[in-house]
């Protein structure tokens, strides 16, 4: 007999998704947090889970009390009617409003009120499971709620449910380090606050659950709650249930080598159809998808291609096989003119020197001249890359290929500027 929990990240009931085209304005409620929560309730009931747990920032703001009440109450009553328990913790957004709502919805169990850790037994049919929760007592909490806390383990898996700012030491929103989370001795941490989901697995069921649906183009990719299965005393499966009603996708179209501007349309259509196929394989395909399109590569046809996407075309670029409304949220032309590098490299002036350097980057990885150039570049780039100020951007490791790409981009831009100056002077 398996035990199943559906873990839900930041919902932000009351918020409306931004950057929707006019054609979708009237569907904002269904495409936003309320629609995402409704889908979550349906999936929880369909899957017959034992409990739904919410990781804070359930409600956007105090002003959303009535909308929050309506949506939360209706979801909770559907779930409890189906025999599913509903629990949650408070985040920094809903410090006042969520406890007030919980007082009005007795079936909703608010865990760890007032910033005091609380453990609850979610076990069933001889399958034990303990959930530890902590709620924000006020909007700003400058210290870690996990440090100096002893979690006396109980039988079966023990999971933590917490809204916090992980690995951001100076944060006013319950800063917690990964080391503290690991040292707590629990089997996993279901976290709220950061809207980009981590990749949780049965082996390591710890991390940010992510916002329930992407509310703007800054929250691209798959969003939805996580289904956690416990069998014979251990977590056997963790799977994201991708069900966000609105999907945001960055789309880069490399136009290098196209012979006519219309090829951009064909290329985009191909990409959107691929995306549609991927999205159709999710738990619940989205009702709308916003594309942030960048035209890149070397071609003289960038502006001409962009002009093919007029206002009407952007409002709805494609209708998916399950009815998803695809629109272009923004289209940026970042194409660069073609440069004959080999020809330039024969010149004895600064552009010629720069062109020879750029050509070095295209040589094989073991070429000594290329390696020397990259070593020089990394000496200058590494300290900047490691600067703590940029850590939050999550750039990852700076390897040779990343350094080469950086040089290629900045070198090409510089070369273009040099050539433009010469043309001006001529
Ligand atoms: Mn938050």
Image: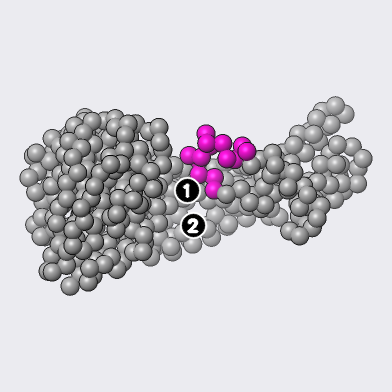
The front one of 21 and 250 is 250
The spot of residue 100 in percent (x, y) is 13, 35
The spot of residue 109 in percent (x, y) is 13, 47
The magenta span reads: 383-396
Image vertical order of residue 369 relative to residue 350, above or below: below
Residue in view at x 52 percent, y 36 percent: 388
The front one of 404 and 43 is 404
**Quadrant in the rendering for residue 144:** top left
> Which label number is shown at residue 291?
1
The spot of residue 216 in percent (x, y) is 40, 41
Helix, strand or loop status at disc 2:
helix
Identify the main secondary structure in magenta.
Answer: helix
The reply to whether the C-beta atoms of the residues labelled 1 and 2 are less than 8 Å apart is: yes
The front one of 196 and 2 is 2
Residue 161 in sight from this viewpoint: yes
> Which label number is shown at residue 269?
none
Q: Is residue 272 magenta?
A: no
Name the residue carrying label 2.
272
Mark 2: few/some/many CA within 10 Å (<14, 14-19, 20+): many
The mark that comes first in sequence, 1 or 2, is: 2
Residue in view at x 8 percent, y 39 percent: 104
The front one of 234 and 331 is 234
């Amino acid at each position: 007999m398996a035990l199943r929990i559906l873990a839900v990240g930041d919902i932000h009931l009351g918020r409306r998704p931004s950057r929707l085209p006019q054609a979708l304005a009237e569907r904002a409620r269904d495409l936003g947090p309320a629609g995402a929560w409704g889908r979550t309730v349906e999936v929880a009931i369909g899957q017959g889970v034992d409990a739904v747990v919410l990781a804070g920032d359930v409600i956007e703001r105090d002003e959303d009390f009535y909308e929050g009440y309506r949506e939360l109450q209706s979801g909770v009553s559907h779930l409890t009617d189906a025999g599913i328990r509903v629990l949650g913790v408070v985040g920094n957004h809903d410090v006042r409003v969520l406890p007030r709502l919980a007082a009005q919805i007795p079936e909703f169990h608010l865990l760890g009120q007032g910033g005091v850790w609380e453990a609850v037994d979610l076990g069933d049919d001889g399958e034990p499971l303990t959930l530890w929760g902590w709620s924000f007592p006020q909007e700003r909490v400058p210290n870690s709620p996990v440090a100096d806390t002893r979690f006396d383990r109980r039988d079966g898996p023990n999971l933590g449910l917490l809204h916090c700012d992980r690995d951001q030491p100076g944060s006013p929103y319950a800063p917690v380090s990964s080391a503290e989370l690991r040292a707590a001795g629990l089997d996993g941490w279901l976290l709220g606050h950061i809207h980009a989901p981590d990749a949780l697995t049965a082996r390591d069921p710890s991390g940010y659950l992510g916002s329930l649906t992407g509310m703007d183009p800054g929250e691209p990719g798959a969003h939805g709650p996580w289904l956690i299965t416990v069998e014979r005393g251990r977590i056997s499966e963790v799977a994201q249930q991708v069900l966000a009603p609105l999907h945001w996708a960055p789309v880069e179209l490399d136009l290098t080598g196209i012979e006519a501007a219309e090829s951009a349309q064909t290329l985009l259509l191909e990409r959107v159809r691929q995306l549609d196929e991927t999205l159709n394989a999710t738990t619940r395909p989205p009702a709308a998808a916003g594309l942030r399109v960048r035209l890149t590569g070397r071609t003289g046809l960038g502006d001409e291609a962009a002009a093919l996407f007029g206002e009407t075309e952007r409002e709805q670029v494609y209708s998916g096989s399950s009815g998803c409304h695809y629109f272009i949220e923004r289209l940026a032309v970042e194409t660069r003119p073609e440069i004959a590098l080999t020809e330039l490299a024969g010149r004895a002036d600064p552009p010629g020197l720069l062109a020879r350097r750029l050509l070095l980057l295209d040589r094989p990885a073991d070429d000594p001249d290329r390696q020397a150039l990259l070593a020089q570049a990394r000496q200058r780039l590494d300290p900047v890359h490691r600067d703590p100020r940029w850590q939050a951007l999550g750039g990852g490791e700076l390897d040779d290929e990343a350094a080469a790409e950086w040089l290629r981009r900045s070198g090409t831009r510089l070369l273009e500027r040099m050539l433009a100056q010469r043309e001006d002077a001529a």
